[in-house]
Image: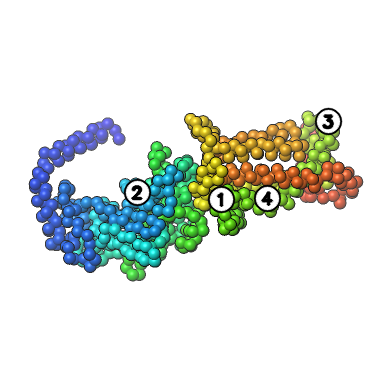
Amino acid sequence: MDKNTFTGLFLIMVIMGASFFFMKPSEADLKKERIKAHADSVKRGQIAGPKAAAVKFVDSAKALANKPVDSALLKTPFGATTVGTEKFITLENKNIRVKLTTQGGRVYSVELKDYKTFDKKPLILFDGEHNHFSASFAAGNSSISTDKLYFTPSANELQVSGKDSSTVTMRLSYSPTQYIDYIYSLKGEGYKVGLTIKSTGLDQVIANSGTINLNWAANMRKQEKDLVQERRYSTLYYMDTENAVDYLSENKDDQKEVSDKKMQWVSFQAHFFSGVLIAKEGFSKVNMAVNTDVTDTAHSKQMSAGLILNKSTDGTFPMEFYFGPDKYNFLKTQGYHLEKQVYMGWGFLAYINRFSVLPVFNFLSKFTSNYGLIILALTIILKLVLSPLTYKSYLSMAKMRVLKPEMDEIKTKVGEDNPTLLQQEYLKLYKKAGVNPLGGCLPLVIQMPIVFAFFRFFPSLFELRGQSFLWMHDLSTYDSIITFPNIPFIGNHLSLMCLLMTISTLIYTYFNNQISGATGQMKYIGYITPIIFLGALNSYPSGLNYYYFLANMLTFLQQYIIRFMVDDKKIHAQIQENKKKPDEKKKSGGGFQAKMEEMMRQKQQAAIAPKKK
């Protein structure tokens, strides 16, 4: 905007402000106008009189008091509903407490009664002006949005218990026989709130009354100890009517529009809790967005969705909300495949967690509610299953250790100036001895998917939330033994369990080097990784670091036992026996080792060729 444009706009604003100040009517005139407008609206049917509605509604005559009125606005469609007083209606059952507001007829706040925030305060998903829900449509020559219009409630509160269910209607009146109802339903137990939007007598008033445009937005409140981690696992999920689930970016602001498929539901997920809007027959179009305001420490993320819903065969727009925990097994009981919003990892890692790790975890949960012991038992079972691979890896490293003296002789003979020839001679030795140099690595590589699967499993595991073990007060977040000003790479605290995990990994690396006989740079590279993990995992759940620590300790125990099963003298004798066998009968490295030898040979020839020229 240039300077002249800005100056012009400023002058217009000054003139408009001065006109409003000097030409505004007196308070007495305004009061008379409000009373006259209200009486005229009732008379011509723009708002319902006290006996007009089939449902007994709460008196809202005071809605016009003490509010400045735009008489021109009152004459527009639904104009009388632009003025009112905000009131709150409470819906409550065993599990949730929902507040509705007459302004917009929307859900104002949601409290989950069974849960608390990390600091033991009531857990409220969203509330107040940080949450919006509205229907928008065209009526006459006006564009109407219900967000700021005043509805009339059928009751001041609703409490439901046991197997009962009940409803509250929020009515937006156009006339005594023409209105829009938001019908909220609630059962005695559960986290679902039904919402059916029904218009009566408005087909000739509302353009394209066969569809409705909905706008839903919420700033999800901070619930957990670590806001950074909460944001890391918070985003907007959605599922189409073909049960395909996707989500917006967790790490950056993102938006997406989907119009080629019907959407079954849209979920505002805040790590361990979510608000989900479900359309039984699907939304025909959805425009979604997720944003992070790093300066707002009271909320995790801002999420919004614009949705188009077609009218059902009974003439209504049926939907329902789910406001509750993202507990995988519980979500499965809620239908609509809501459990798919619990992220279990990418690709086949998700299958490992869903069909292997989670069932074992649930089985162990039947015997104890102590999740520290459950993680211990889970780790023991996993180590037992992987013990054949651990044994094979140890045996392969033992063979390499036995061969080390001969490899040192080759190194002395060939020298380090020609690494290609040196590797070629090493491969010849491996082949004669019947040793696969990758034998110690492959079992570890096979185990890596499980390591990564657990890396995603524990942060998403709702069951760990608020569970304590030893000094760890909450296994779903970090444990801090000391806090300090923010330090790059580490953060503002030091996690004791992460520190123990790092120390155990360094010790494991030391003994692993002793077993494999690693020398040179390879001997020290293994010590760098645990230090990197200290910074990377310092803010991750203590339950995850506890698992990695247990895995290291159990690996020590396994290797200690295997040492009694592996005799270096027998290995050396077997290697010498292998050397005596004909080359074609050896099975050291198979096709891979043959390809390696051929590659080394070609590389050596390529290095010699220029010298001959």
Q: Label 1, label 3: how many angstroms apart (C-alpha)?
A: 55 Å
Q: Which residue is mark 4?
A: 383
| Left or right of 461 in this view: 139 | left
Mark 3 or mark 4, which is nearer to you? 4
Q: Disc 4 residue type?
A: Lys
Reading the chain from its start, which is encountered first: label 1 or label 4? 1
Residue displayed at 19% across by 59% down: 59
Q: Amino acid at mark 2?
A: Asp
Nearer-N-terminus badge (1/3): 1
Residue 450, image x, y percentages: 63, 50
Which residue matches tag 2? 127
Q: Amino acid at mark 1?
A: Tyr
- Check disc 1 and report the residue beneath it: 371
Residue 486 visible, this orientation:
yes
Separation of marks 3 and 2 at Cα, in angstroms = 74 Å
Q: Amino acid at mark 3?
A: Thr
* CB within 8 Å, label 3 to label 2: no
Residue placed most toward the observer, 2 or 394: 394
Residue 62 or residue 427, whichever sits in front: 62
Question: Disc 3 vs disc 2: which is toward the camera?
Answer: 2
Q: Nearer the viewer, mark 2 or mark 1?
A: 1
For residue 412, the mark is: 3
Whichever of labels 3 and 2 marks the residue nearer the N terminus, that label is 2
Secondary structure under the numbered disc 3 in the rendered image? helix
Give how far apart the Cα atoms at labels 3 and 4 are: 41 Å
Q: Quadrant of the N terminus?
A: top left
Task: Name the outermost residue toward the right.
Answer: 580
Front: mark 1 or 3: 1
Residue 458 place in picture, x, y as percent = 55, 48
**The quadrant where residue 489 appears:** top right
Secondary-structure class at tag 1: helix
